[in-house]
Image: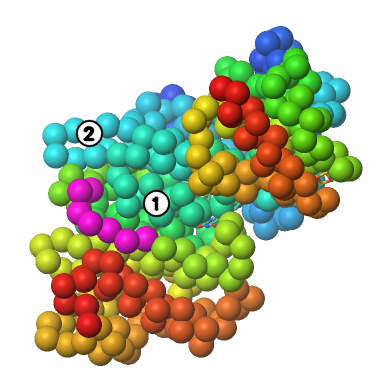
Amino acid sequence: MQSHTITLNINEESHIVTVRAADTLLYTLRGKLGLTGAKPGCLNGDCGACTVNVDGWPMKSCLMLAVEAVGKKVTTIEGLKKAPIQQAFIENFAFQCGYCTPGFIMNCHSLIEQHPDADDRTIKEWLESNICRCTSYIEIEQAVKSVLKKK
Amino acid sequence: MLPFDFDYYKPETLQEAVELYQYLDQQGKQPMVFSGGTELITLGRIDLAYTEAVIDIKWIAECKVMQVSGDHLLLGSTLTLTQIEEANLFPLLTKTASEVADHSARGKITLGGNICARIFYREAVLPFLLADSQVVIAGPDGGKVAAIHDVFHEELKLKRGEFLVQTATESRFIRAPFFSVKRRQQWETGYPLITVAALKIDQELRVAISGLCPFPFRSKEIEAAINKSGQSATVRVDGALAVLPKPILNDVEGSAEYRLFVLRNLLIDVLAALDGARFR
Ligand SMILES: Cc1cc2nc3c(=O)[nH]c(=O)nc-3n(C[C@H](O)[C@H](O)[C@H](O)COP(=O)(O)OP(=O)(O)OC[C@H]3O[C@@H](n4cnc5c(N)ncnc54)[C@H](O)[C@@H]3O)c2cc1C
Ligand code: FES
Ligand code: FES
């Protein structure tokens, strides 16, 4: 079948949505469900602007088909409710234009959950997945570290 | 988003997947095995890949296996590189895989997808070439277990409708001292200029390389030169450079000459790391 009616668990809510098998999760979130927090950038897995969390791990939603997300827990930036990393981004001025920010925050959020004791190497390894063209990297690093330290 | 439509199937058994492939192939659907799926999703978008039927094999139990069975480590082909890294059951593979793409993408890219990828780096195969691993393959003729050296020549030689299910690696290779380095043109993520993986077993060095030629390889000739006793490191490395397979890549990542320069230094690093006693 080329079109599927599927149930997606997004931000703790079930959504029934009809998608083409060829639709990416990014397109489905934005175009079908109105969740425009995940940003389209390269659409090629390179920039990280589209990052969401799937079962607690960072996922570039342009690299996943919507049909692959069935049975998984998807969290988008809209699903974070006052997560510490959001506040930390504000306090550390970790963005300028803000386009890369949802992707960075979702990646950082997942890092903090999976590796609360992350060392510099792990932080670097994870955050290399995202690109910021306004160069807020130092501030982003400070934001992540401020949350990790509190943990 | 992909500019063409396809049917999406998620078989739950090997047999179902094999039968589906044959059926869809007969129907002219150009079926495609889909593991992490990043090849179809990225190349399909720019019209460099096409299919009318996707067979997503990551719902098949055998393809998700990660376990030690007797003296062998079994790794399913649809494990993501991140799953493999986090479990860290095969440190050389962890190190080599951790250099592919970037951390988030490695949560989607799978072991089998990387080994069978059209893109010619296929770096995740290097540890298995070094460890004389075996591969489990499913296909229309039933399943088979083969030595990786019998089925991997530049790429995994699969017959139509066959697919990779698992790798099996003996634990003595998993414990062996190793070295793995990826050199890029610049930055710390991206395609390799050259990736070298090496392992020391029974006092002999083994070396496998990606990014030098348009295919990953392990070469007996190179190893014979590297292991020559009674010669200096420089002479041994020169010997290895004289017996490289061809062609040497000459592309935007680096000229052939530059690649050879980098390789020379990497081989010296291999000797220093794994053969310190004989390193002069
Ligand atoms: C952002 C990004 C960065 C990348 N960087 C690198 C890099 O640094 N180094 C590198 O080597 N590659 C890199 N790649 C390429 C990537 O490794 C390949 O696209 C690889 O195919 C991805 O694995 P996958 O699981 O998504 O494979 P898939 O897309 O599922 O499959 C790849 C190919 O193998 C076939 N296949 C998959 N599984 C099997 C199986 N079990 N048996 C038989 N055939 C099978 C498929 O039909 C397809 O043709 C990068 C890709 C992206 C998106
Ligand atoms: S849009 Fe997904 S990584 Fe760039
Ligand atoms: S804040 Fe502008 S791209 Fe990062």
The image shows residue A25 at horizontal and vertical percentages of 71, 31
- The answer to which of B138 and B114 lies nearer the viewer is B114
Q: The disc numbered 2 marks a residue on which chain?
A: B
Is residue A43 shown to the viewer in this render? Answer: no
Relative placement, left or right, of A23 versus A57 is right
The image shows residue A58 at horizontal and vertical percentages of 61, 33
A84 in magenta: no
The picture quadrant where one finds residue B202 is: bottom left
Element under disc 1: helix
| Residue located 46% across and 63% down the image | B182
For the C terminus of chain A, which image quadrant?
top right
Q: Does label 2 point to a residue whose CB lies under 8 Å from ligand 1?
A: no
Same subunit, labels 2 and 1: the answer reads yes
The picture quadrant where one finds residue B229 is: bottom left
Q: Which mark is residue B95?
A: 1
- The answer to which of A138 and A114 lies nearer the viewer is A138
Instruction: Specify how the rendered protein is coloured.
Output: rainbow
For the N terminus of chain A, which image quadrant?
top right
Q: Which mark is residue B15?
A: none
B255 up-or-down from B195: above or below: below
Relative placement, left or right, of B152 versus B102 is left
| Residue located 14% across and 39% down the image | B71
Which amino acid is tagged 2?
Val
Q: Which mark is residue B68?
A: 2
Q: The disc numbered 1 marks a residue on which chain?
A: B
Which amino acid is tagged 1?
Lys
Q: Which residues are magenta?
A: B174-180
Evaluate if marks 2 and 1 touch, with contact meaning CB atoms under 8 Å apart.
no
Q: Residues within 10 Å of mark 2 (few under 14, many from 20)?
A: some
The image shows residue A21 at horizontal and vertical percentages of 68, 31
